[in-house]
Amino acid sequence: MGLGLPEAVKLTEKQKKVYELVRIKRHTISEAARILGCGKPTAYYHLRRAENKITKFMRDQEIEVEIKRLEEEVRDLRWAIVKHYLEYLGIQI
């Protein structure tokens, strides 16, 4: 099953199957439930769990990227402060 998701997104087999059927293959929840041999509420539950895990993973990735950007910005600001202070002291870099 090729969902194209990183392994860091930990989905159960049922979650993977219902996500693939509904979001990739465009089946309805009722069709997915019939194919998987479970009730519609169960299929919906697994779909929501899969979507929540995927959303959380994507949000975490965005946060990591923002943290790295801010760390670089802080590093640049620190260097600018050091350079300014050294110039103030008359020390050439």
Image (cartoon, rainbow, N blue to C red):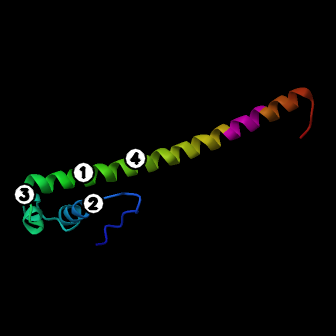
Residue 11 x/y as whole percent: 30, 59
Q: Main secondary structure of the magenta part?
A: helix
Reading the chain from its start, which is encountered first: label 3 or label 4?
3
Q: Are marks 3 and 4 in contact (CB under 8 Å)?
A: no
Reading the chain from its start, which is encountered first: label 1 or label 2?
2
Residue 31, image quadrant: bottom left
48 on left or right of 87:
left
Q: Amino acid at mark 4?
A: Arg
Q: Amino acid at mark 1?
A: Arg
Residue to which mark 4 is pinned: 59
Rounded to the nearest whole Å, what is the CA distance between mark 3 and mark 2? Answer: 17 Å
Reading the chain from its start, which is encountered first: label 2 or label 4?
2
Q: Amino acid at mark 2?
A: Thr
Q: Are marks 1 and 4 in contact (CB under 8 Å)?
A: no
Q: Are marks 2 and 4 in contact (CB under 8 Å)?
A: no
Residue to which mark 3 is pinned: 39
Judge depth for marks 1 and 4 and give the one in front.
Answer: 1
Structural crowding at the residue carrying mark 1, measured as other residues with C-alpha within 10 Å and reported as few (<14), some (14–19) or many (≥20): some
Rounded to the nearest whole Å, what is the CA distance between mark 2 and mark 4? Answer: 20 Å
Residue 34 x/y as whole percent: 6, 65
Residue to which mark 1 is pinned: 49
Q: Amino acid at mark 3?
A: Gly
Residue 29 x/y as whole percent: 11, 58
On residue 12, which mark appears?
A: 2
Rounded to the nearest whole Å, what is the CA distance between mark 1 and mark 4? Answer: 15 Å
49 on left or right of 76:
left
Give, as a single range, the part of the protein colored magenta: 75-81
